[in-house]
Image (spheres, rainbow, N blue to C red):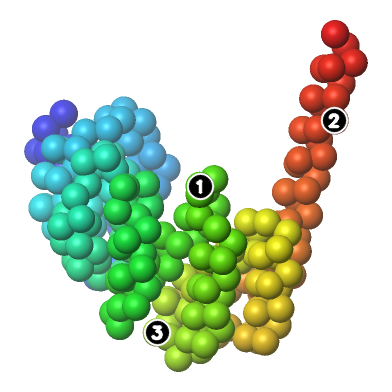
């Protein structure tokens, strides 16, 4: 599929209502106002097309860039290309979209370490979003690795910029859900941090209270594991 054809589809799918909604969420770039449901359908139809993704990104259109993040091939994302895309993010919706492809790339850990130290709101947010993804993924990263970031979150969250605070709070939750040891450490960290204030603008979005959220999520994980063990045990008995 060519860029011109995709842009025509995006233009046809956009609505004034969605443009208004995205505007309330901070999108000021040129946009069509395409719903995530329709973007998801386009992603499913296109699958992975890295060349198209790069072409769509260059268009500068918000919807096209979100779709580009969805269809880009993480394996082909160079460190330089990630830096380019991240530097051009000007709202949290696009930052979240780029976080997805960045977290799946071979540069995820390296870039996360750099971006979480950035002063820019969107770059730093992407860094913490990538850390959230790393915490939620099975990998070789140690508990000590994540424990270090608990300290950084505690020391820096209240002085961070608005959406960066939200991303840091999400990272705190993800680290706490990773395992039993980190659950205890993250909950203790969350209690010392206290309430995290984030201005969500003219939206109904809220910032989750980390400590109870971690407890609830860990309980869900434990219940899921218990069900899996029960199913495995039942299969053994049935043989």
Q: Is residue 104 left or right of residue 149?
A: left
Percent from the top left, x then y, of residue 138? Answer: 54, 45
Q: Secondary structure under badge 1?
A: loop
Q: Residue at x 41, y 60 (%)?
A: 130
Residue 47, can we see it? yes
Q: Residue at x 42, y 77 (%)?
A: 164
Q: How many marks?
A: 3
Could you tell me which residue is drawn at 32 percent across and 70 percent down? 115
Give the side of residue 10 with respect to residue 211, left or right: left
The reply to whether dot 2 and dot 1 touch (C-beta < 8 Å) is: no
- Left or right side of 227 for 61: left
Q: Residues within 10 Å of mark 1 (few under 14, many from 20)?
A: few
- Residue 8 visible, this angle: no
Which class describes the residues within 10 Å of circle 2: few (<14), some (14-19), or many (20+)? few
Coordinates of residue 162 in the picture (x, y in percent): 42, 82
As measured in the structure, the alpha-carbon distance from the residue carrying label 2 to the one carrying label 1 is 25 Å
Distance from label 3 to label 2 (Cα)? 46 Å
Q: Which residue is mark 3?
A: 161
Vertical relation: 151 (above or below) 179: below
Question: 113 or 44, which lies in front?
Answer: 113
Comes first in the chain, label 3 or label 2: 3
Q: Secondary structure at mark 3?
A: loop
Labels 1 and 3: the sequence-earlier one: 1
> Which numbered dot is residue 230?
2
Alpha carbon distance from label 1 to label 3: 29 Å
Tell me: 11 left or right of 147: left
Frontmost of labels 1 and 3 is 1
Q: Is residue 140 above or below residue 41?
A: below
Residue at 21% over, 33% down: 49
Q: Which mark is residue 139?
A: 1
């Amino acid at each position: 599929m060519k860029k011109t054809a995709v842009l025509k589809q995006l233009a046809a799918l956009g609505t004034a209502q969605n443009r208004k909604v995205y505007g309330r969420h901070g999108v000021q770039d040129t946009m069509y106002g395409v719903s995530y449901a329709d973007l998801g359908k386009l992603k499913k139809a296109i699958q992975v097309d890295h060349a198209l993704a790069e072409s769509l990104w260059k268009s500068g259109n918000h919807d096209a860039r979100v779709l580009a993040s969805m269809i880009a091939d993480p394996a082909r994302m160079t460190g330089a290309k990630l830096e380019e895309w991240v530097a051009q993010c000007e709202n949290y919706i696009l930052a979240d979209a780029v976080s997805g492809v960045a977290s799946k790339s071979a540069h995820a850990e390296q870039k996360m370490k750099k971006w979480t130290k950035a002063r820019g709101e969107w770059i730093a947010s992407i860094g913490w979003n990538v850390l959230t993804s790393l915490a939620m993924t099975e990998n070789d990263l140690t508990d000590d690795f994540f424990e270090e970031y608990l300290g950084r979150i505690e020391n820096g969250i209240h002085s961070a910029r608005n959406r960066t605070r939200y991303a840091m709070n999400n990272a705190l939750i993800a680290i706490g859900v990773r395992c039993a040891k980190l659950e205890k450490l993250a909950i203790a960290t969350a209690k010392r941090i206290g309430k995290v204030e984030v201005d969500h603008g003219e939206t109904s979005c809220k910032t989750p209270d980390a400590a109870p959220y971690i407890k609830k999520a860990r309980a869900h994980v434990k219940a899921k594991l218990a069900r899996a063990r029960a199913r495995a045990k039942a299969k053994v008995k049935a043989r």
